Image: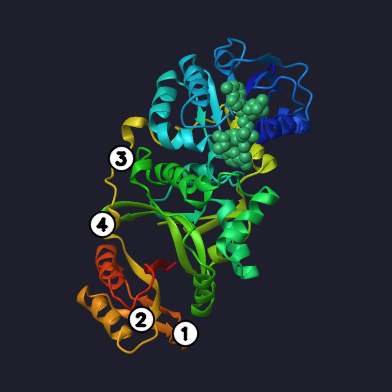
Amino acid sequence: MRGPLNIGIAGLGTVGAGTVQLLHRQAELLAVRAGRRLAVAAVSARDKGRDRGADLSTARWYDDAVAMAADPAIEIVVELIGGADGVGRRVVETALAHKKHVVTANKALMAEHGTALAEAAEAAGVALAFEAAVAGGIPIIKALREGLAGNRLSRVYGILNGTTNYILTTMRESGRDFAEVLAEAQQLGYAEADPSFDVDGVDASHKLAILASVAFGRPVDLAGVYCEGIRQVSRLDIEFAEELGYRIKLLGIARLTDHGLEQRVHPCMVRRVTPIAAVEGVFNGIVAEGDFVGQLMLEGRGAGAGPTASAVVADIVDIATGRRVAPFGVPITALERVPGAPMERHEGAYYIRLMVKDEPGVIADVAAALRDQKVSLESMIQRGRSPSEAVPVVLTTHATVEAAMQRALAQIGKLDSVLEPPQIIRIEDF
Ligand SMILES: NC(=O)c1ccc[n+]([C@@H]2O[C@H](COP(=O)([O-])OP(=O)(O)OC[C@H]3O[C@@H](n4cnc5c(N)ncnc54)[C@H](OP(=O)(O)O)[C@@H]3O)[C@@H](O)[C@H]2O)c1
């Protein structure tokens, strides 16, 4: 067996400490699978005194993670600090500049700077591996890039954020509102004190941009992701979805259309019988559709120390054994500059919920606004009869173009009898 492979780990938080623990616990198994012992030769974090739940006595400590990335004794730099810019980015850039392999779990960094970093890795002749950056323990990057290399993919979609899936699942199961369930998720540690990264869809957008790049062999285009979060989803919408045979999920969807590549993150109604509807709680699930393989789905834990460390270590083993694939599956020059499809041209069915005054003529006015934009209705549910209160009216449409729907909604929103801004949720026909 060759000598040990010296690894430097920058960041010893949830994922970093989990990775060190996994490397220690599975040392014998990994030595066989990697053909060399995997040695944690150097580490860096802010607080040297903090217990990381693992023996770091043989690792060289660096206060400066960037200096560690330049250490000639280190062959693989594992970046687990985070952030699109700042120290995490400098660690990765320094490692690549010193021709060291890089493994990172940093989705923000890969979504913002993935193409440039892949270019630097290619020029240096080293690996840039980021399995842990998308859907934690689910090996989706490898599945898309290597396992499905014989296919042209038409669509990749999934539940990419466990926090929002937990919130939506709990809202449905308990019949409670978003704010109450979010507060509980924060107390339980499932949601951050500042939840916007998760609930506004930012985290899912980062992951979708990376997935789309791998699936469709194009430069990472975070700015091209249309993004809406789940704050507007109400208990009422969840009840109506159930009544209509749907479940509401925050999905990231990348799809090749005649207008270019569509990338969007927003709440969706999916039929309750579909496999993706059954992915509940903190779990993630991703579906890929290929021309030869058909449809396939992977489900698992998208975050947490163990699952994320599992993905980080798989990347390390690949590098140790010399299994090397271009970060996005093809050389940088072969990345296709497919144009992004504008959201206005998206075509699909819609759920619309209105809160209206219960008086004659309301439905006729709403129907007229939809007719004017050639939006054809599929169903309508009208609830309750209380002249003094707002009552919900729910409509579903046949496939229609987003721009027409937005024009109709603007018109509907101006009606005196419509008391709140209309709520829409796109219906996905999987
Ligand atoms: N948590 C997950 O489940 C998960 C899943 C998938 C991907 N990720 C990604 O993995 C990365 C790490 O996430 P995490 O949850 O492990 O974060 P975390 O628990 O906040 O840990 C961050 C680590 O970075 C260290 N650090 C911060 N600034 C530093 C600096 N200037 N120099 C050296 N070290 C520094 C911190 O040191 P101290 O400990 O001393 O403060 C800490 O150990 C992020 O990119 C995240 O998006 C996380």
Q: Which residue is mark 1?
A: 383
Question: Which of the two discs, 2 and 4, sits closer to the camera?
Answer: 2
Classed neighbour count for the residue bearing mark 2: other residues with Cα under 10 Å, few (<14), some (14–19), many (≥20): few
Disc 1/disc 3 C-alpha distance (Å): 50 Å
* Residue with the mark numbered 4: 258
- Ligand 1 contact, mark 2 (Cβ < 8 Å): no
Q: Nearer the viewer, mark 1 or mark 3?
A: 1
Mark 2 or mark 3: whose residue is earlier in sequence: 3
For marks 1 and 4, give the CA distance: 39 Å
| Mark 4 neighbour class, 10 Å CA radius: few under 14, some 14 to 19, many 20 or more | few
Q: CA distance from mark 2 to mark 4?
A: 25 Å
Residue 320 in view in this figure: no
Residue 172 rendering spot, x and y as whole percentages: 60, 68
> Tag 3: residue type?
Glu
Where's ligand 1: which quadrant? Answer: top right
Task: Give the residue number, with chain letter if any, for mark 3.
Answer: 336
Question: Which residue, given by chain and number where applicable, does mark 2 sit on?
Answer: 378
Badge 1 amino acid: Arg
* Mark 3 Cα shell of 10 Å, populated few (<14), some (14-19), many (≥20): few
Q: Amino acid at mark 4?
A: Asp
Residue 137 rendering spot, x and y as whole percentages: 62, 44
What residue is shown at x 40% (from left), y 68% (from top)? 423
C-alpha span from label 1 to label 2: 17 Å
Q: Are marks 1 and 4 in contact (CB under 8 Å)?
A: no
Which numbered disc flags the more N-terminal residue, 1 or 2?
2
Judged left or right of residue 374, residue 110 is right
Between 257 and 250, the residue placed more toward the observer is 250
Find residue 376 and report its horizontal and vertical position in percent: 28, 78
